[in-house]
Amino acid sequence: MKSHTPLQILARDLSTTLKMQGYFRPCQDRNSMQKPMRPLFFFLCCVALVVAGCSGPKALTKRGAEMQDAGMVKQAAELYYQALRKKSDHIEAMVGLRSAGQGVIDKWVGEFQQASMDGRRKDALDLYDSMSAYKTRISGVEVDLIIPASIVTDYENHLDEHLIELDELGHQQLEAEDFSGAAVTFKEIIHLDAEYRDAKALLVVAQAEPEYRKGQTELSEMRFRAAHDAFSRALYFDDGYKDAQSLRQSALEDGRFNVAVLKFDSRNRDKDVALELRSNIQNGLIESDDPFLGIVDRTQRDEILAEQELSISGLSDEQVEVGALAGARAMLSGAILMYTMETGEPIRSPRQGFRKFFREVRDDEGKIKKVAAYAPAQYTVHTQRRNIIVKYELKLVSTETSEVLFSKVEEVSSSDNIEFATSNVQAGMLYPARSNGEVNRSGKSQMNSLLGARRELMPKSTMRNQAVQEAASRAIRQVEDFLSSYIK
C-alpha cells in the first residue's frame, strides 16, 4: 500500500470535506459564477496554514531527528538550530542540537588532528577557526558545545609557531621592498592576533611607503595632481606618515592654478544677464571640489589695477600682465553673444464636447430611475509658449604665455508652454468628443486635467535665472575639465 506524507493526507482530507459540503459544485447559471471564489480562497488559506505548520519548530525537530538517524549530523543540527530560532525553549530541539552539533565539532576535531600530524599547520588553524565560529553560532540559541582542551592547547601552539613564521616572512618582504606581499602577510598576522608585536605599524609601512615613494617621483617630475593623490593615499593609512603632509601641500601650492574671472562683455540691454552669468561662474569655481583651482580675489585684483593705473578693455596684453601680478595663471573672460526671450501670442481653440446629466425614465415595470445622458457643450483650449536663448563665449587665456588655453561658444535654450481648458460646464461632467463626433467617455480624466492645468507661463525672471544657471554650470564644468587634464 502506497504511503502518504502527513501533508498529503491532510490536504486529501480537507479536499474531501470541502467537496462533501458542496464547495466545488459546478456552476448552474451566470448568476452563480462568482460563488466558488469564496470556498477556493478558504481552501488556499487552509493549505497555507498546513504548509506553515510543517515549518514549525515541532516539524523541524522531527525532520532533524530523521536526518540524524540517517547519519547526516550537520544537516540535522541546522534543522534543530532553526527550530530553536522559532521557539527557544523547545527541549527536544535543544537535546537534538547538543547531540548533532557536538557531532559536527567532533568531525572537525578529527580533521584538525589529522592536519596536525601531517604538518599542515595552516589547514589545522583554519579548521579550528571553523569549529570555534560554529560553537559561537550555536551558543546563540543557548546550546553549549565542547572543544576539547587538548585541541585548544594544540591550536595555541600551532598559532604561536605560525605567527613567528609569518612575522619573519613579513620582515623579509619589507627588506626586499615587496610591499604588496608584506601587506598581505601583516594583514594575516593581525587577523590571527590583532595585538601581535608591531604588526599594525609594519602594515602601515607596507601600505603607505609605496604611495609615499610614488608621490616623491611624481612631484620631482612636476606631475602635481598625481603627487597630491599619492601623498593623500599615504596619509590615509597614517595621517602623520613621514613628511607626506608637507610634500602634499607643496604639490598643491606648486600646481595650483589661480584664475581671475573678468567682466563679461554684452550689449547694454544684456548687462544684467552678463553680470549674473559671471557671478554664477565665479561662485561655482570658488566652490569647486578641485583643490588645484583657485580664484583670484576681486578686491586684490582691483587694488592692483588701481596701483598700476591700468584699465581693462577687452583681453589686452596689459590685462594679462595684471593677471600675473594678481597671482593668476589665467584670465577667464566671456561675452553674451545673444540673449532672446520670446513670448508667443495666446491661442484659443473652441472645441466641441458633451455635458453629462441624468434624466428620469420609467422602466418596463413602471418604476422611475435615473440614467446618464449627454448634451452638446462647448469648451475652449488655451495654449501659449515662451522661449529663451542664451548664447555666450568663454575664453581662458594664460597669463604666462598669452596662449588661449580654450575658447568655447555655447548656447542654452529652454521653453515653457501652457495648455488648459475653460468651460461653463463643471469639471467631472464635461467630456471631449471623438473624431466621429461621439462622446469620448474614456477622455474624462484628460479633460479634468486640462480644466485644472496651470494657466500662467513661468515668470520671465525665473526662466532667465534657470537659463543663466545652466550656462554657468556648463562653463564651470569646462574649466574643471580643462584643469583636470592640464594639471597632471
Image (cartoon, rainbow, N blue to C red):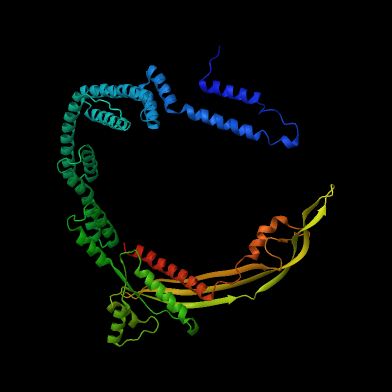
Q: Please indicate whether residue 317 sits to the left or right of residue 215 in the image.
A: right
* Snapshot quadrant of residue 141: top left
Q: Residue furthest bottom?
A: 309
> In front here: 342 or 378?
378
Q: Position of residue 381 (x, y in %)?
A: 68, 68
Query: What's the residue at 27%, 86% (across, down)?
Result: 307
Position of the N terminus by quadrant: top right
Q: Position of residue 365 (x, y in %)?
A: 84, 47
Q: Please indicate whether residue 292 sits to the left or right of residue 393 in the image.
A: left
Q: Is 237 above or below relative to 471?
A: above
> In front here: 321 or 464?
464
Position of the C terminus by quadrant: bottom left
Q: Is 305 above or below relative to 347?
A: below
* Snapshot quadrant of residue 193: top left
In this view of the protein, can residue 94 be seen by the observer? yes
Q: How many marks?
A: 0
Q: Residue furthest top?
A: 1
Query: What's the residue at 25%, 53% (across, down)?
Result: 236
Q: Position of residue 411 (x, y in %)?
A: 50, 71
Query: What's the residue at 36%, 22% (across, down)?
Result: 73
Q: Is 195 above or below relative to 414?
A: above
Q: Position of residue 359 (x, y in %)?
A: 79, 58
Q: Is 237 above or below relative to 126?
A: below
